[in-house]
Image (cartoon, coloured by chain):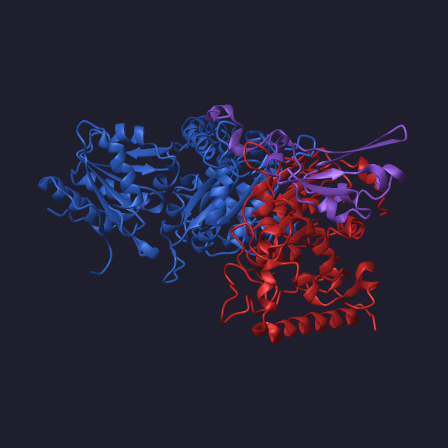
Amino acid sequence: MSVKLKDMIQSPQIMSSGHRMCAGCAAPPIIKIMGFALRGPTIICNATGCLEVATTIYPQTAWRIPWIHVAFENVAAVASGIVEGINAMKEKGRYKHEHVDVIAIGGDGGTFDIGFGSLSGALERGHDFVYMVYDNGAYQNTGIQRSGATLPGQETTTSWAGKAEPGKRERKKPIAEIVAAHRIPYVATVDPFHYRDFITKFRKALEVEGPAFIHAFSPCPRGWRSESSKSMELAKLAVETGIHPLYEIINGDEYIMSAPSKNLTELKPVDEYMKLQGQFKHLFSPQWEDFRKQVQEQVTADWERLKKKCGIA
Amino acid sequence: MNVPIPASKWRVSDEMTAATKSSKTTESSSNIEGLTGDAAIARALKQCDIDVLSAYPITPQTIIVEDYQRFFADGEVKTKVIPVESEHSAMSACIGASAAGARVATTSASAGLALMWEVLYCASGLRLPIVLAVANRALSAPINIHNDWSDSYGARDSGFIQMYCQSCQEAYDTTIMSFKIAENHSVLLPAMVCIDGFILSHNVEHVELLPDEVVRDFIGIRDPAQVLDPDKPITIGPICFTDYYFEVKEQQDRAMKEVFRVYKEVESEFEKISGRSYGIYETYRTKDADIVLLTHSSPAGTAKAVVDALRDRGERVGLLRLKLFRPFPAAEIGKELASAKAVAVFEKCLSFGAAANPLALEVRTALYEQPKRPLVTDFVIGLGGRDVPPTVIVEGYNKTKQYLEKGKAPFYETLGVRK
Amino acid sequence: MSKKFNEIPMGGNILEPGSAMQYKTGGWRAERPKHTPDDCLWLKNGTCLLCWIFCPDNAVKIAEKDGKRTYAFDYDYCKGCGICANECPNSCIEMESE
């Protein structure tokens, strides 16, 4: 799909102003950009999380398309039910829409961790829906606790940086690759800064038959202790440093590096990404110099591994 | 004081396990088959033409889904069967499908129902009709696959309607009625249809099946109230804080109270097509009874035989067999039992640390306002599938008689356990 | 506000889409964006619009009618995050203290 500004201006906004997401949160732009990729009637299922809570504070909703929230760990299952319910009613001749797209949205906690079983099950069953994770690297909604998406060295309220610990020590789950291992037709990583790449990929995700997965990188000024104005810059830096490379995985094994990542002559140092955030501040003390180096080595190694998978020398 | 009863008296006649009334109105088109409780429910679900069945295997409800998957494999149903990866997802998928306007069902038991717990409350809170067939089974630990009521009794506050069946016929009939009750716009609540695991789920009985078109005309097509519709986008399941959560719960409570009326309406319609009805509870020889035995599900069949045997010995005893546990028909039961001297409750659930157990707590509350409050005894029986022979019921009866003479009874006691 | 149980939709459903518009988030703002039109690519040639795309609160209001383009901030909703100012390629937006 070609992404024209003219079309974007005409496109209806699926989420209104007046929501209570923090100033500078990248999740609303992610939803807006996702909205540009929609192709017709759409139903959104939202796992418990910042986005769900802050956009639907009763008695008001920011959503302009049908939307449902049930619980934290089950959004993929809820979406399964909607897809199959509609399919059944369609086959029985009592559903008025020819096609409705179903999108499940979860945060990293709801996707990498508590909702992973439900996600994996839905992927295996092959329902035709898109799952998007907006990954802000921790349980930000409950007060910045570590998740499976938290980066090594990241300080959270359950992985403090202290005299003995550098924040979280463990690596981040490679969720896109784990999901792709289900051999689903389409997986892609996106970020809001590279919005054209995002829209194109999301549209592809909608168009494939069967489940598709979008991993959207979502800077969080509150949790990351970054300036609210820097969220798009951080998204861009995450791509440029290899923290969140942009790529697609077709049918589970065909890896394609996307232009914004492919065009990088070399990665920027992870330090540049970390320096803009209070949550990594402690890593710049001499005590954690080695640890920081290890994080860089891990990011570089992952990048090289990805390049190899994408057939880039 | 104890009343000895010869063993030959313990034969429960067919009449006792069948519906209360069985005047046939559709005998020409009816069809009788030998079915297990699970199979009977599967047949009912098939005839209800559900859009989505989303379930996860757990003994002893598995046959329901196995049978249904066979209907699917043979192209006999247009249902989308979702073989989910957990019970939590089973109920979650039902919620999604129901919110999209589909007619949905699932089945579970024991640990599976426990895993569903969180989303049971979501289903009822979102006011989504969903039928959940439960083959009642004990909860772990120790792990045990046999029957008691700890699973669905534990979910008694989840906002589900709960109907307990005593026969395979009743399981079949109740499953059909449950859609019409749950989907009624005065109700819009999920419903559990409960059968005793193994005792009913795996026990073959004669079941009279209604013709497909009769069931179809009876339940019709679901007319959803508020759905996920791109033409009329609504937000389902927002966050409600201190200002409105309570009002939403008030609505839910009132909807639950509507079930008494709707149940009766639906059942009287059902009686017209089937000749069968059960009532929200059933009384048996209670009119002049001094002591009324009160229970439901399979022990009620045993208790009926005990009543007959004791009556033969001149004992003034009757039975109240409860069908609807949620909502609990406290006002009607209170009136019904007001003239009894004592009520002996038999229940297959132990509520650890409670003053008494779930059924007796309800019964005592129901009777509290009666001017001549009957004595209530509470006997916990048959945990983990421990057999409940007539002797256990008789023991409870005899104890109640003793307590009545003393004018005092313990809050509850266990029967049929080695101690 | 403060409606009774029978005056609200069933199950906590919200029937009016986009009703969050009733809630003005402009009061959160500590800094307000100020737009200088001179070098704005949108006004100049109808391109860019990064500020509009990235605004988390749909507070950048743009329009095009008969070849005429307009640009304004909606201070009812702008939370003052400053993403627009940070991303503007021609530095047309400045954040000023409220």
Residue A16: quarter of image: top right
- Depth check: A81 or B21 in front? A81
| B333 w.r.t. A309: above or below | above
- Chain B: colour as depicted: blue
Residue B33 appears in view: no
Residue nearest the viewer, comparing B387 with B252: B252
Q: Residue furthest bottom?
A: A290
Q: Is residue A58 left or right of residue B325?
A: right
- Give the residue displayed 58% in from the left and 69% down from the top: A170
Counting every numbered tag in the picture gives: 0
Q: Which chain is purple?
A: C
| Quarter of the view holding residue C27 | top right
Q: Is residue C15 left or right of residue C40?
A: left
Hue used for the chain lettered A: red
Q: Is residue A163 visible?
A: yes
| Residue A149 in the image, given as x and y percentages of width and height | 61, 61
**Residue C58 position by quadrant:** top right
In x, y percent, where is residue A28?
Answer: 67, 44
Outermost residue, front direction? C97
In depth, the one of B378 and B252 nearer the eye is B252
In the shown orientation, is residue B154 left or right of residue A243? Answer: left
Q: Is residue B65 above or below residue A5?
A: below
The picture places residue B137, in percent across and down from the top left corner, at: 40, 53
Residue B302, image x, y percentages:
30, 46
In-front residue for pair B163/A308:
A308
Q: Quadrant of the C terminus of chain B?
A: bottom left
* Residue drawn 55% across the image and 49% down it: A141
